[in-house]
């Protein structure tokens, strides 16, 4: 089967880094029986002369299989460098390596129980030395260096969807997560955090394919970080959906839609989302033999809520809510890649006088 592992195709990659445009290429492939799968990207920043890359590999020659990834990119540190009382953005290089697997513990017609395991190592360094003057006040540096962690996630699910569904329609999902960061696993820092995620789906008995979706997430942890926090939630980013289609970039499902991208952060987190989803038009049509197929157009009304703080006691004083709607289109690209394009509007509720229009790829919760 090894001769069949050669790349099956490639795509140009156009994107953005912290300073400007990037240009590169992506390739992907697998063997004839899908035991070895891989994808790779490499790009060059025209304003930074920085070369980044991302390589992912899936091995399915044994049960339950293995996933591995190596990544290098350029961006800004999560927190600024404070020099003489003035916060300054820090350009940093990120190296990421991770490997993991998912272990099915129980499977039946009624549901499934699985355990996901992941080891990750991040190395973050400033690209330029920090400027310091002897007459300055004491500087405050961002948390950088090695961040290594073990992640475990135990998930119980009986979620069901059907051939004409616009969303999961029945059942629920419960996931317990644990993340441990410690010098024993290679980190310069120590951190322990736990999360609980629950989601449920209920079909409207009077209107076929209409679905009420609910999701709740809670998390708390402690760390030796000086300034970083364990959890963060913000608005959806302003994206170029054409570039995202080419590059296969999806947004994270959890967000306060309508809020600015800059996140609220804390070591304690409570978030929830409610959506009512309804179909609008079944298209099921493409254009000749082009690798583009529009399956269905549907809509959703939503309410998002989140509270983040340094301690659970402070959550009540740091609540934020938004509401709005989305128009969604389910596509099939390259004859095999399902994606959802989402055009929406959200606005803050209560004391948060914010609003935003967004166009992104990726599913909601």
Image (cartoon, rainbow, N blue to C red):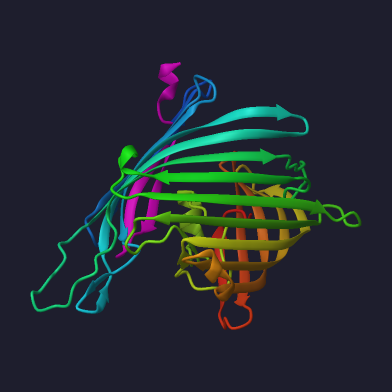
In depth, the one of 167 and 279 nearer the eye is 167
Q: Quadrant of residue 118?
A: top left
- The answer to whether residue 66 is left or right of residue 213 is left
Residue at the extreme right: 206
**Rendering coords of residue 4 (x, y %):** 44, 21
Q: Is residue 334 above or below residue 114?
A: below
- Which residue is depicted at the point 48% across and 52% down? 249
Q: Is residue 180 above or below residue 144?
A: above
Residue at the extreme top: 1
In depth, the one of 168 and 147 nearer the eye is 147
- Which residue is depicted at the point 88% across and 57% down? 207
In depth, the one of 229 and 351 nearer the eye is 229
Magenta-colored span: 1-27
| 141 drawn magenta | no
Residue at the extreme left: 134
Q: Quadrant of residue 211?
A: bottom right
- Which residue is depicted at the point 67% across and 39% down? 156
- The answer to whether residue 319 is left or right of residue 213 is left
**Rendering coords of residue 120 (x, y %):** 39, 41
**Rendering coords of residue 308 (x, y %):** 52, 67
């Amino acid at each position: 089967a090894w001769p069949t592992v050669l790349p099956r195709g490639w795509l140009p990659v156009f994107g953005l880094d912290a300073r400007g445009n990037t240009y590169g290429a992506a390739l992907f492939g697998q063997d004839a029986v899908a035991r070895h799968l891989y994808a790779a990207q490499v790009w060059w920043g025209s304003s930074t002369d920085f070369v980044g890359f991302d390589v992912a590999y899936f091995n399915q020659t044994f049960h339950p299989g293995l996933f591995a990834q190596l990544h290098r990119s350029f961006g800004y540190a999560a927190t600024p460098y404070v020099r003489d009382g003035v916060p300054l953005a820090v350009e940093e290089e990120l190296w990421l390596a991770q490997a993991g697997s998912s272990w099915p513990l129980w499977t039946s017609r009624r549901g499934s129980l699985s355990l996901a395991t992941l080891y990750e190592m991040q190395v973050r360094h400033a690209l330029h030395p920090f400027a310091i003057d002897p007459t300055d006040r004491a500087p405050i540096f961002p948390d950088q260096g090695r961040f290594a962690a073990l992640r475990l996630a135990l998930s119980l699910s009986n979620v069901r969807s059907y051939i004409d569904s616009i969303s999961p329609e029945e059942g629920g999902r419960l996931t317990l997560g644990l993340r441990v960061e410690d010098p024993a696993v290679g980190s310069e820092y120590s951190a322990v955090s736990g999360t609980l995620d629950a989601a449920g789906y209920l079909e409207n008995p009077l209107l076929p394919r209409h679905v009420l979706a609910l999701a709740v997430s809670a998390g708390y942890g402690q760390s030796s970080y000086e300034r970083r926090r364990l959890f963060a939630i913000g608005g959806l980013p302003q994206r170029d959906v054409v570039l995202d289609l080419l590059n296969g970039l999806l947004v994270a499902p959890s967000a306060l839609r309508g809020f600015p991208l800059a996140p609220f952060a804390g070591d304690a987190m409570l978030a929830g989302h409610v959506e009512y989803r309804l179909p609008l038009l079944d298209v099921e049509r493409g254009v000749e033999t082009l690798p583009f197929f529009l399956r269905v157009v549907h809509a959703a009304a939503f309410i998002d809520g989140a509270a983040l703080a340094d301690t659970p006691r402070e959550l009540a004083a740091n609540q934020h809510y938004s509401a709005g709607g989305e128009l969604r289109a389910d596509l099939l690209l390259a004859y095999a890649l399902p994606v959802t394009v989402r055009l929406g509007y959200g606005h803050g509720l209560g004391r948060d006088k914010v609003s935003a229009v967004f166009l992104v790829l990726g599913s909601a919760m």
